[in-house]
Image (spheres, rainbow, N blue to C red):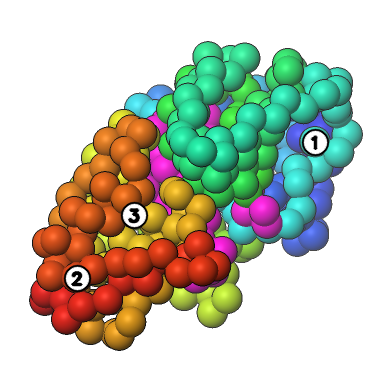
């Protein structure tokens, strides 16, 4: 960002009128100034530092007065801001985003290489839009559904992902974002790097590798847990991975992957559990047959082409 743009954002920050996306952009810019001195910094200390920096404008590089911030970032911190407002800078500089390239994955996951060298695996039924050439100050893409990102590190060029009302900002790391519209959740799982998640001015949590945070956009509740990230992101290497999941949860993934509707004849069969994986290109009939054999169940195709699974199940 140019000094004039930084000054405008800092003025709004001091007045308390900066949006969540603008605050995220400032935090991302702040990270670029002196990561060697960063150890730990609370949200309140960050605010104090940003205000202090604003008092010293004009500047070429901000003098970071405090020697503590979050532990030094080997892969840059990811800041997720749940807001419908796109970056102030985006509205003022569209020099490199004339035409969006659209890539859909209607019948199977797809790997994409972006202009900056970042790689994205787009899950089945998902869509990714990006400019043919990123502009000089920011890398922006637009996601619908689920994708795994391996972002090429560039401290001077933030990478921004817009997923509906969710804005995700990263300098470089590897992570998975899953938007579940049915359950009103956005789930972030970190494979590599360090991630900060926020909802407006509310800091939801800091994630390290093998940690996961799920935010319910309906009731605003946050769930954070330790997971095996390799299992969560396994979908980009194989089609589907089920780790001791209920058949009800398995059905949700099959519905998304194969674009079918699956129901159960009774609740008991839906509570049965299953562990397994599907390989790329495996037919739905073969997957259903394996699941039903394991759980003492049967399935049939209804006149509306949906699937009904019946049986006592196995708990």
236 and 59: which is toward the camera = 236
Image point 31% across, 45% down: which residue?
Answer: 240
44 and 208: which is toward the camera = 208
Residue 185: percent from the left, percent from the top? Answer: 50, 65
Q: Secondary structure at mark 1?
A: helix
Residue 42: percent from the left, percent from the top? Answer: 45, 55
Which mark, residue 297? 2
Q: Furthest-front residue in view?
A: 303
Distance between the Cα atoms at labels 1 and 3?
Answer: 29 Å
Which mark, residue 90? 1
Q: Secondary structure at mark 3?
A: strand
Q: Nearer the viewer, mark 3 or mark 2?
A: 2
**Start-end of magenta stretch:** 164-193
Image point 58% across, 15% down: which residue?
Answer: 116
Image point 82% across, 24% down: which residue?
Answer: 99
Q: Work out whether 117 lies above or below 270.
A: above
Quarter where residue 68 is shown? top left
Image point 68% across, 56% down: which residue?
Answer: 165
Q: Which residue is mark 3?
A: 212
């Amino acid at each position: 960002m140019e000094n004039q743009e930084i000054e405008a954002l800092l003025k709004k920050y001091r007045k308390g009128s900066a949006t969540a996306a603008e605050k995220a952009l400032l935090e991302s810019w702040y990270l670029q100034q002196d990561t060697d001195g960063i150890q730990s910094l609370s949200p309140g200390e960050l605010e104090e530092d940003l205000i202090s920096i604003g008092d010293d404008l004009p500047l070429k590089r901000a003098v970071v007065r405090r020697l503590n911030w979050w532990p030094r970032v080997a892969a840059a911190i990811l800041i997720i801001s749940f807001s419908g407002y796109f970056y102030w800078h985006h509205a003022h500089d569209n020099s490199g985003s004339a035409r969006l390239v659209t890539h859909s994955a209607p019948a199977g996951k797809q790997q994409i290489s972006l202009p900056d060298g970042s790689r994205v695996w787009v899950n089945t039924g998902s869509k990714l839009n990006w400019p043919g050439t990123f502009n000089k100050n920011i890398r922006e893409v637009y996601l619908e559904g689920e994708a795994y990102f391996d972002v090429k590190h560039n401290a001077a060029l933030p990478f921004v992902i817009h997923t509906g009302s969710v804005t995700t900002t990263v300098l470089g790391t590897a992570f998975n974002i899953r938007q579940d519209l049915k359950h009103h959740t956005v789930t972030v799982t970190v494979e590599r790097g360090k991630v900060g998640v926020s909802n407006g001015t509310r800091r939801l949590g800091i994630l390290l590798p093998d940690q996961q945070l799920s935010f319910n956009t309906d009731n605003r509740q946050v769930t954070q847990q330790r997971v095996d990230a390799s299992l969560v992101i396994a979908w980009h290497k194989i089609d589907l991975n089920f780790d001791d999941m209920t058949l009800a949860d398995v059905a949700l993934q099959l519905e998304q992957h194969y674009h079918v509707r699956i129901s159960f004849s009774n609740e008991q069969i839906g509570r049965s559990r299953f562990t397994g994986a599907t390989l790329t290109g495996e037919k739905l009939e073969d997957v259903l047959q394996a699941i039903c054999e394991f759980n003492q169940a049967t399935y049939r195709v209804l006149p509306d082409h949906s699937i009904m699974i019946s049986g006592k199940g196995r708990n």
